[in-house]
Image: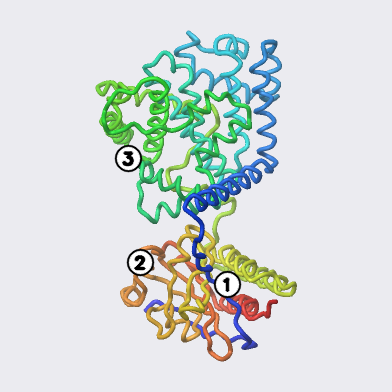
Amino acid sequence: MKVDEARGNGAAADDAVAVLPAPAPAAAGAGSTADDEAREDALRQQRRLRLMQRIEAQPDLLAVKTSMVNLQQVSRSDRSHVRALTSLIHDDPAMLAKLLRLVNAAYFRSAGGGEITSMARAVHLLGFQKVGMLASSLRLLDSLPPGAAGAKLQREFARGQLAALIAQTLCVSRRHAEHVHLSALFQRLGDLLTGLHCPDEAQVIEDQLDLQSLSPESLARQRMRDRLARARWGVTVEELGHDVARGWGWPEALVAGMRSLHPGATGELLTGDDYARALCTAANTLAGELMQLPHAGSPEEQAAARGRLAQAFSRRVGEALALDAETLPDTLEQIHGDWLALLKALGVTLLPPGEVPAPAAPRLAPGSQAHRQQLADHLADAIELLRRLNRRGAPLPEVLEAALQQLIRALSLQRAVACLVDPATGALRGRLGVGDKAVVLAPCFDIPLRPPGDLFGLLCAKNADTLIRDASDPVITQRLPAWFGERVRAGTFLVLPLVTTSGQVVGMLYGDQREAGDLVVHDRGLALLRDLRQQVLNALLMPRG
């Protein structure tokens, strides 16, 4: 059995155990249904207001908002001058070049009659309003953070650009031809905003959807996401985008065009504004599907995959949007090529789906002397941090979260979970999670202790600090609970029981990595992990008023 085990020492005291309170049962409703609905609506409005205040308080968004409002004021003024708009966009000539590239990608086929090479020509042909809106999208791109978070948001920005090109090219309505580009481009503005300013909460929602095995672009996933977002924020992600756009002074006609409308299954041809909204919605869905395609394979194989998506898209919405099924695959290939050229001109580099940017510093080889020293240094810092928190009597949730964050940092874990005893059942339950899908996976941790029913319960009963190098080992697998194999699916994991000197199990710290063998802890590291665990145990046993 591929198990490294070391006995841990108990706590120095055996006082009453402090645990996170279990959720209180809902009070029995005494009011009428109408009163309940009114209260719920008031709560939603409060959550919505708090979210808007939180987002608007962000310094980077405030700068973007000021720029957006100024752009709108200039673009709506009859006395506007090209130089005024140019100065508001950016003093950087490279930014102006990007804007002209974006203008050409969006409009030169229909409006320019040739390539647009100056701001004066762009404004003359397209108007201040449209040029200002395209400049707004570049302002958003300029505000994205670096690293993995920025890479994810760049994909969202790129998706909007692809959707805009699809909607513009496929539009058969002269009335809407000039507007669908902007509507499709900004239809998912809320996704950019939540990813930029509420990334952890937005990721929790996506993790909850993933656990339900809902397809990425399915209508069922969208509806469930709306419910989860409304429960968390009082507003859907899309509605958040509308609220912010109105605050930026965007025209109400554009905001109305950003409202999604999924074409029905009847196949009836849509008309009027419903046609434009459905076209933009379908374009965004197709853009998401195209960006989910794997990058592996020859160019011919990748083109064939896009062709199959085009055919499926035509079957799904072709009649409702008056699409030409025969020419659609070739049209989509042209759009895809134009999109890649646009991204290159804008300086946007996309990673394959699911891939994250390489860290600034290469990961040290597990087991190397440098890795051992780094692990020891990180754990020593973590222990000192927890000592300081305990000295000032920090709340237990703060100590637990700090401990999990430090474990992730020191051991390069994908996630860490803190389990505490449920007073009602006597079982260990996941109360806090940090890392990949940890927030939604933590409640899955349900570990019987009386008697122990699985490997986790047995290790806690033995007070054994344990590293499982390969969770797929048959001897290990048969002792793991069903929820581990169905939901968690880690390749290697670490268990640190929290046990008092009298042998009472009060909790457990858990951390894992995706692949077997990726988690390596040497003897010095294990000793430091015991010290870290002791600081968490001290926090659990600390009397609190």
Using the numbered discs, state the Cα–Cα distance from disc 1 to disc 3 in whole angstroms.
Answer: 51 Å
Task: Indicate which label's residue lies in the foreground, 2 or 3.
Answer: 2
Residue 319, x across and y down, in percent: 27, 25
Q: Residue at x 58, y 89 (%)?
A: 501
Packing grade of label 1 (10 A; few <14, some 14-19, many >=20) is some
Label 1 vs 2, first from the N-terminus: 1
Using the numbered discs, state the Cα–Cα distance from disc 2 to disc 3 in whole angstroms.
Answer: 31 Å
Residue 146, x across and y down, in percent: 60, 43
Q: Which residue is mark 2?
A: 485
Q: Residue at x 28, y 32 (%)?
A: 316
Camera-side residue: 491 or 261? Answer: 261
Residue 34, x across and y down, in percent: 49, 49
Residue 85, x across and y down, in percent: 67, 18
Helix, strand or loop under label 1: loop
Label 2 vs 3, first from the N-terminus: 3
Residue 94 placement: quadrant: top right
Quarter in which the N terminus is drawn: bottom left
Residue 536 placement: quadrant: bottom right
Total number of numbered labels?
Answer: 3
145 up-or-down from 319: above or below: below
Name which residue type carries label 2. Answer: Gly
Report the disc number at residue 20: 1
Camera-side residue: 309 or 318? Answer: 318
401 up-or-down from 475: above or below: above
Report the disc number at residue 123: none
Q: Is residue 238 left or right of residue 453?
A: right
